[in-house]
Amino acid sequence: MSRTGTRRLTACAGAALSVTLVLSACGGDIEESSAGSGDAADCEDLNLAVNPWVGMEASSYVVGQVAETQLGCTVNYRETKEELSWAGFGTGEVDVIIEDWGHPDLEKQYFAESGDSSAEDFGPNGNDGIIGWYVPPWLAEEYPDITNWENLNDYADEFATSESGGQGQFLGADPSYVQFDEAIVDNLNLDFKVVFSGSEAASIAAFQKAEENKEFLIGYFYEPQWLFAQVPLARVELPEYEEGCQEPASATDCDYPVTTLKKIVGTEWADSGDASVALVENFEWTNADQNAVGAMIAEEGMSPEDAADAWIEENQDMVDSWLAS
Amino acid sequence: MSATATGDGVRTAGFSAMFRRAPTWLQVAVILGVWLAVWAVLKGTDTLFLSGQSKNDLHDSLGDWKDGLIAGRDSNIWMQATAWIGDQITTVGTWLQELVSQPAFPRPVPQIGWLGVVAIAGWIGFALAGWRIALLVIASFLSFGVLGYWEDSLDTLLVTLLAVAIALAIGLPLAVLMAKSKRFTATLRPMLDTLQTMPSFNYLLPIFLFFGLGFPGVVVATVIYATPPVIRIAAHGLTSVSATTLEATDSLGQSRWQRLRRVELPMAKSTIIVGVNQTTMAALSMVVIGGFIDSPGLGQPVLAALTAQQTGDGFVAGVCIVILAIMLDRTTTAASEHGERVARAGGRNRTRHRLVVAGTGVAALVCVYFSRLYSGLAEFPNITWGDSLSNAVQSFADSFTSTFDTALTAVNEGVTEGVLNPLQDLLADSPWYVTGTAIVALVWVLSGVWPTVVTAACLGGMLAVGLWYDSMLTLAMTLVGTLIVMALALVLGVWMARRPRVDLVLRPILDAAQVMPPFVYLIPALLLFGFGRFTAILAGVVYAAPIAIKLVADGIQRVSATTVEAAEASGSTPWQVITKVQLPMARGNLLLAANQGLLYVLSMVVIGGLIGAQALGYASVLGFSQSEFFGKGLAAAICIVLMGIMLDRVARGAAARQTERAAATDRMLVKTPIPAAPTG
């Protein structure tokens, strides 16, 4: 086909296509929604961040499904790492981070006090975040003294793997989680090397396998997490957390503090008066609630939407309390 | 005193003269021997180890630079310009999505329903490349729906085509300039070289900073990544138009513009389309990796499957990517052949062809019309074949891994303990100055002066950004991966070259494997071996093997039949023919295969940071993940670029040197093909 032929053809095809699009604007069984999308008070788009751990997925989808089915919002899930989610407030790509584990550096950058005020704190979401060092239950049973950090060096050889270069292996987590384990290992003179698993699922798989095959494994883990229902990991005692023992990060020689998990939202969205704002503001549930939804997603293989719907059906009272303004 | 000094001097001079005269393998052995001896004494000192979640001042200041940029989002002219560009891209992207894949408010469905989309796509396939391709396109689109990834597949296609359109708009004029101006070529070529040695993953971090999440980030990254192939190949096509033709048409008195439009572009058309094909495939692989920065499309389900270890889901999404890749590859390739066939056909056939195109076009529009009216034709029916496939794969995978767990672990630990760890100890646990000197010396011996200079500069760069230790870990993984690739390539390449029937079977498989985006390979590797360095290496091996095998096979096939016959007539066994005649004569190609192997494995080892590959890959992922570590991620990106350039120059230098020697000794010039950059 010659060049002019191609061009003419493209032009004709384009014109014909647009005529067809206009012609078929009405009729058929597709109903256009009227402006304002339904009866619920003006709810438009709600952009929920989903960071890479199942617990957060559970919280986000429960809020999202309530917003979609009971408020009539259009919900978008933004699957990114934490840092990218925070950056998304300023551009309107993200409205809500439903579970934040504490990011002083990001708060400095995006909160009103010292940053560009694109984000603000919307209060606790009811979950308590516990981060720490864990071993599989069989290990704690067989060697009770292993749950104290002071005895870890006695077992370092047992923990060694082909990845840890002669030292004991400490399984670090997803790179996007804030972790002080390398510093702790260093400062407590432990003969261990931190090896990063890369993702939550990889860590879970490792702990499951270690319990099943009675292997030595120690690593970073956290609650709320559905795995505890299946494999009740035992916590290893570290020197107790005290104010300032993580300052600077490289001098950390203590356990992780308990974190009150909170909701972080985009300022612009919070000021929009959207119906979903009240929902997110009122949202609060327990670790057990989150673990129930998380287990449905990760263990039973349900889609997050279905898992959220199943929980919502059982717990409409709590949902109603979030919806009451 | 002076006597002794002179004596030493003489002895040193004698040694260095001997060293210079020694064969290459002996020189290498001497360097390695000295290195090992020094390592035994000094190991563990001055390794410049920097633990995973710590950083240095340079990383901090790079991070501050980023914070400054973000804080100045509303005042910085650059940030405003990029935000404006980003807005335009988002507008076009969203418009395209509402046309075919996302609900177009106030409609609950897209403007064109699935039936209309399939019809239009099939029609485009028909008009561009004939009915076979039309069938392929229709079958591909239907399979996206049947597998349950209709929207994601269309989104991937949209972003890819949008990026390709921009890439061609930028790339073709640059190609013309390159073909016309030597000086322009001289400035552009080093830039293209650098861009083409850079793993795709590396583009994301800096581009995310300026263009943000979603459409803008991924489109810009894809354009930058996918434009170089078309510039290169189209420029090559334009410069190869025969001088006689140009003279003949010039004598008719045409302007330069006429000459370009009427003669050069049409004559270079088929080469240019090869470039378009390469650009399209590169774009697809980038769009998939773009899932990291929230690109719409199939990258996200793959990424989600990787982090959740839902191998079944990842597999199904991967199948859609593969179908998409084959469809795009076949369509672009067939379009050039088809165009020529139609153009060559006589006047009446042409008219008939136009009538058929117009007729099918009307039929496609009728489909569009109905797909706008009925929701059953608008929303793809909910077919759960994808779920069944996912479950089947998942349960197969689970039973496979639990049955062979011991064997798989043994393989993993065998390679890790037997090869990877020792090499890593030598590279990373020697003091940095020892490793550095040894590498520079090896390159000097193997590749000559210019690569040595480049190597020294690149190593200096890694040192300067403070990631020496991690760089050495990544280098060790890349080298081990490349060794495995070369072993595979030698065995299979020789087999293919000597048995035409094997070639007939293997080649199409290798061709198909080559169009696959690298991301896809992580899924089966992770499935079999769990997280760790070996898994990333294995994925890299699978990714790099096809091109390396083909290069080796081609090199051996090019050895003249007469030479082989002569060797056989003089009583050589097949083993002797292979080792004494065919492999030595194909060594130029072997080294090119090693070059490609290095670059491909490197790009995969970096993506492998996601599945526990540690080192530079981990630092890159960390850079995306935590704002505090952005600077470290950027430094890792710099190291990866430097490593790519270094490995590329070293292998090319060695190839050039071997080819020279081969030419001198064998009096037979092995023609070296232009090395292609990895598409990953």
Image: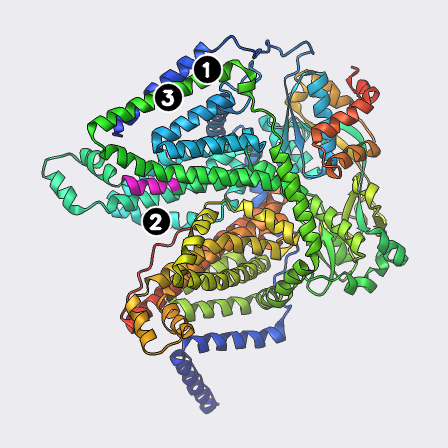
Determine whether the residue tagged by mark 1 lies in a helix, strand or loop.
helix
- Residue that numbered label 1 is attached to: B369
Q: Nearer the viewer, mark 2 or mark 1?
A: 1
Residue type at tag 3: Gly
Magenta residues span: B269-277
Coloring basis for residues = rainbow
Q: Nearer the viewer, mark 3 or mark 2?
A: 3
Along the line of sight, the residue nearer the viewer: B61 or A137: A137
Marks 2 and 1: CB-CB under 8 Å?
no
Along the line of sight, the residue nearer the viewer: B281 or B56: B281
Q: Which class describes the residues within 10 Å of circle 2: few (<14), some (14-19), or many (20+)?
A: some
- Residue that numbered label 2 is attached to: B189
- Residue that numbered label 3 is attached to: B361
* Percent coordinates x, y for residue B474 in the rendering: 56, 57
Marks 3 and 2: CB-CB under 8 Å?
no
Residue B357 versus residue B239 in the image, above or below: above
Residue B367 versus residue B575 in the image, above or below: above
Figure quadrant of residue B20: bottom left
Figure quadrant of residue A162: bottom right
Main SS of the magenta part reads helix
Residue type at tag 1: Tyr
Q: Which class describes the residues within 10 Å of circle 1: few (<14), some (14-19), or many (20+)?
A: many
Q: CA distance from mark 3 to mark 2?
A: 43 Å
Q: Is residue A29 left or right of residue B440?
A: right
Chain ID of residue with mark 3? B
How many marks on residues?
Answer: 3
Determine whether the residue tagged by mark 2 lies in a helix, strand or loop.
helix
Residue under the point 84% across and 34% down: A288
Q: CA distance from mark 1 to mark 3?
A: 12 Å
Marks 1 and 3: CB-CB under 8 Å?
no
